Image (cartoon, rainbow, N blue to C red):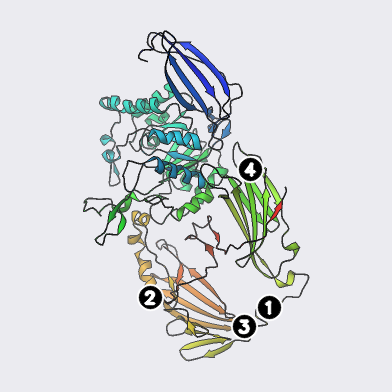
Amino acid sequence: MQGATNGHIKVELIDSDRNDVGSGSAKMSDSGEAAIVVEVPKARLWSAEAPELYLMLVSVYDQQGQLIEVVPQQIGFRKFEMIDKVMHLNGKRIVFKGVNRHEFNCRRGRAITKEDMLFDIRTFKQNNINAVRTSHYPNQSLWYELCDQYGIYVIDEMNLETHGSWQKMGSIEPSWVIPGDRAEWKDIVMDRAISMYERDKNHPSILIWSCGNESYGGEVIYQVSQYFRSSDPGRLVHYEGIVHDRRYHETSDMESRMYAKVVDIEAYLDDDPIKPYISCEYMHAMGNSLGGMYKYTELEQKYSMYQGGFIWDFIDQAIVRNDRYGKEYLAYGGDFGDRATDYYFCGNGIVYADRKWSPKMQEVKYLYQNVKLKADRSGVTIINENLFTNTKEYELECILYKEGNAIERYVLDLDVAPQSQQWLPLEYGAGKLSPGEYWFDASLKLKESKSWADEGHEISFGQYVFQIEEDIINGAASVGANELAPALSVVHGDVNIGVHGRNFSILFSKQVGSLVSLNYAGREMIATPVKPLFWRASTDNDRGTAMDYHAAGWYAASFGPKCVKVEIKEEEEGVSIIFDYALSISPEVKTFVGYTVYSDGSIRVRSTYHGTPGLPDLPIFALSFKMPAAYHKLEWYAMGPEENYQDRCLGQDFATLRIPLRTTYLNT
């Protein structure tokens, strides 16, 4: 340090309670260097769950003992290592519940603000995201400080990507690779590694150095990995490109692949691997996506060497523009008159470019939960998968609903140790519940506000749905659901079948081959006949797999399902009409749609599909049910409130009307 040669340096450590926990000093050499060792016998260890930081004050004195400069630096104590081929933090197996993140602001481009970074960090914490990969360049220094403070694990990635040199339209040619084994590229690549390391090395949140992204393999990147290891043996090294070039397999301390299928990951893990596995990019969250994510998170418990992954990616990269009417919209490739372009390929986030959460976020939050709640008829099991922290900072709220109406609420304090579980019995309804459909919601909420969320923020949730039948209440005899309702009247016409009850009339057409009218109290409820549906709006990821080409036959099948048979069954509990459809895609395919009308006016709909081998993937199997446009209010008694699908619904529960209730506080 200029002016301090032959002076001395003093180091002081202060903990989060403002206690001095250690100090030391040393004389500086002629080159301005000094080595100081400060022992902290009972150091509080840093982790994302409990980001314990110490303030280190480095004071520089000249030869006369005059203070020249004081440098404050937040530091953390933690140990990250490989034990028996598994990554461990502070002695515990770690699982990365991560995202890839670009620095982006829809109005400022890459020039993001502190407020942007705080929004992102708080979004991580509120949705159980514990890790980030800085794709594909070092981020602003403030980002690492925030990851230290809030508790986020970081893969710090150097600024290297040469994807376009060696892979063109799916073709791969190793002779195109840069840097590869080319010695002329070594200095500039190594400069980027050294610059990142020297700037970021003091941040406890950084667990792994990454040698860049999608630059194939070769000797130069291997030398980068060796530089990281020699300079910093307390961290591990990541590089995905070894999957393309196994000559330098030691470049990466972990097997890291992009967008691998679950079956391929399991094949690797079942083959006695020598390295743990992470998905450095997976799920590809472009457009309406993230279906099937649970298949990946299930691997976390099945294989100790599967240690999580990083969703591609966190935020869409779109820019605010004004349309011809002066209205703002989020623009992407092609909206600027730019050609050639990748169009919407910049929109891969679980957060929109204007920093609003997408519906995909709820699935991420659920699947990344560290504390899992498994509810049943008699209580709830709390499974604390945290490595270091218990559940004292949360309270458990349990609510019993009957068909959408909250009837009982309990709030309990918890103290479940990390890596353990506890079952809490609950007796609701005084042991007596009337017939109907119930669900039991369990919700883990913050007792007090944190820097990243307000008091009452829900961190984990679970639900159990069950039925109470009449014949199991106090030994009462079974009573049919419709015995007290008036009988149905069925009219068999030449063309139509009418089913009539009190204040409703339902019409089925043998000619159209469908339900054509639902009339309740004189109001028509459907706009067009109901029909089977086998095609849906294609997503961007579908276009990437050419679904519009190979599955187009299902589009035609949706236009004209042909009714070949109508069957009517009049039974005591209701009247059933079953339509049998043939489809244009293949004479072997059959679809059946059955409607059972009950005397209270309710209808149960069942649809079945019988396929045949060799057909293209089925985009969707559903019914098109269109209501008149005049109806603008709908009560939804199903999964919600966010949009959800068969393969993306774990983050949703039954949409319910929350009403104020008298709360009972229980001690456990």
Q: Residue 9: image x %, image y %? A: 46, 14
Between 239 and 159, the residue placed more toward the observer is 159
Circle 4 residues within 10 Å: few <14, some 14–19, many ≥20: some
Q: Disc 3 on helix, strand or loop?
A: loop
First in sequence: mark 3 vs mark 4: 4
Q: Which mark is residue 560?
A: 2
From the viewer's perspective, is the residue at label 3 or at label 4 nearer? 4
Determine contact: label 2, label 1, CB under 8 Å.
no
Q: Which residue is mark 3?
A: 571
Q: Specify the amino acid type for callout 3.
A: Glu
User: Image height check: is 153 above or below 444?
Assistant: above
Q: Which residue is mark 1?
A: 480
Cα separation between marks 1 and 3:
13 Å
Q: Disc 1 on helix, strand or loop?
A: loop
Q: Specify the amino acid type for callout 4.
A: Thr
Q: Which mark is residue 391?
A: 4
Circle 2 residues within 10 Å: few <14, some 14–19, many ≥20: some
Q: Residue 173: image x %, image y %? A: 28, 39
